Amino acid sequence: MAKKPSIPKGTRDFTPSEVIKRNYIFDIVKKHFQTFGFQPIETPSFENSDTLMGKYGDEGDRLIFKILNSGDYLSKVDEALYSSKDSNSLTSKISEKALRYDLTVPFARYVVMHQNEIDFPFKRYQIQPVWRADRPQKGRFREFYQCDADVVGSDSLLQEIEFVQLYDAVFTDLKLDGVNIKMNNRKILSGIAEVIGAQDLLIDFTVALDKLDKIGEDGVKKEMAERGLTAEAIAKVEPLFSLSGSNLEQLESLKELLKDSETGSKGVEELTFIVRTIQEMGLQSAKLSIDVTLARGLNYYTGAIFEVGAPEEVKMGSIGGGGRYDDLTGIFGLKNVSGVGISFGLDRIYLVLEELNLFPEAIDQSLQVLCVNFGEKESIAALKLVNELRKAGIKADVYPSSTKMQKQMKYANNRNVSYVVLIGEQELESNSFVVKNMTEGSQKEYSLHTVADFVASLS
RNA sequence: GUGGUUGUAGCUCAGCUGGUUAGAGCGCUUGAUUGUGGUUCAAGAGGUCGCCGGUUCGAAACCGGUCUUCCACCCCA
């Protein structure tokens, strides 16, 4: 080993225990995706650059990993461009492929390409890694998994309602109590901007408003002023900071506030329908709350906006989000297809479950039974027993070499094995095996003819 | 992309305003214990102090660069 190996910034190796815990989350999420009628698809890990570039704004373009062309990629670049050192124009000449940046845009591409085979409404889920050339932070990586579920081809609000229930089902199953599903509606934000006379500054207005819980009311006002909102407009925003009461009461206030805005009223109406219906049907462990300051992903969301907050006792931002985008496939030439979708932030959910100790206790156990190896003859007998145990679905193994017992026992202990089986000379003679319970330290002898008794004791 | 922060044994970390041979706990190996782990005791192995360069008689420590970690911003899952 000449040099210590390393992995790129923002990437990770996963240990066996981590993979098992991640799979636990994946399996639960998948199970509920399926019971809600979503179908899985997969798309390539890299796409043509023009599929991705320009879809996420300037900031997004910068964060897309570009793949260098194969072969002598510089020979095709003319001298003038090369010597101009203009990275942006040069990039398109030497790189025609890029790593997937999210799952939504490739999905839109997929829908357009397969529009004639798809039965709409199409409910799909997709769990694959994506890559971003971002600067890493805690819970933020350059390679991470996204779990998305989207519906395209239906503008029914029933979809939004289903997504709230889907979030509730998944987090309930994960035993993660007290998640807060926050909802807003782009139309409400547009309506507010309209009413305060700042339509043109919608994005600036919402970006500032979104920071309320971080920088407080005064901070938001200050930022709005910096972003060009008039003092008059900011004064009109005031009532938003003091919205109180139940979801429906807040919606009632918004209705009054937005009565002069057609768009805004539509948004209030939509949210009211969703809130009423969810209230009627009930949620298992999550709570649904209206949050007019919620303003993420505004570049393409046109209706509902979702964000899921971790339970209050953990300091973790959002663990999921999503929204409705009325014309997602439009960028690829297919008009009038409405879509709505949500995403689960796997890495953060993992951190939250870890912090709250919510992974099942037995999850780490990769081996239930280990047979100590006493030599060739003995190990063959052990292997026969192990075969029977494996057929019964028990995770069992024989230690591969007849090293000292102390070493074998220690290995069993470190692997968190619950039972160690001893088949030595004495046991061979009497056609039996000794089972040591590693947590209690007790031992029990079984006949090799009645392995079923031992199997029964395991369940 | 901007500003800051971190890096010393497999892991978690000490190491003073530059000074001789770089430490601890845990883990690991061996023995006490040739058929019994998790407890105990004894002994042992393991480090080009992230990497490259500079200052100095002398650098783990100071300076510059670079990589990495984490944090804030931007943005976002």
Image (spheres, rainbow, N blue to C red):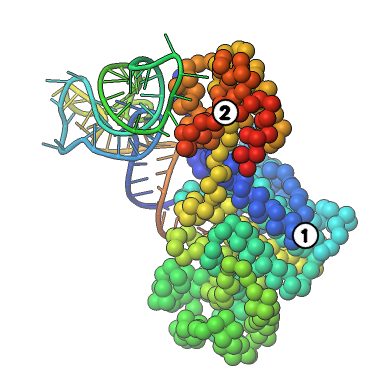
Q: Residue furthest right?
A: A116
The amino acid sitting under disc 2 is Glu
Q: Which one is in front, A275 or B75? A: A275
Q: Which one is in front, A453 or B70? A: A453
Image position, residue A403 (x, y; %): 50, 16
Q: Residue at x 57, y 28 (%)?
A: A445
Q: Which residue is mark 2?
A: A445
Q: Which one is in front, A60 or A364? A: A364
**Label drawn at residue A37:** 1
**Relative to A9, does residue B22 appear above or below in the rendering?**
above
Foreground disc of the pair 1, 2: 2
Chain letter of disc 2 in the image: A
Q: Which one is in front, A115 or A382? A: A382
Q: Residue at x 59, y 91 (%)?
A: A256
Give the Cα distance between marks 1 and 2: 50 Å
Image position, residue B35 (x, y; %): 46, 18
Q: Secondary structure at mark 1?
A: loop
Q: Residue furthest front?
A: A430
The amino acid sitting under disc 1 is Gly
Q: Residue at x 56, y 14 (%)?
A: A425
Q: Secondary structure at mark 2?
A: strand
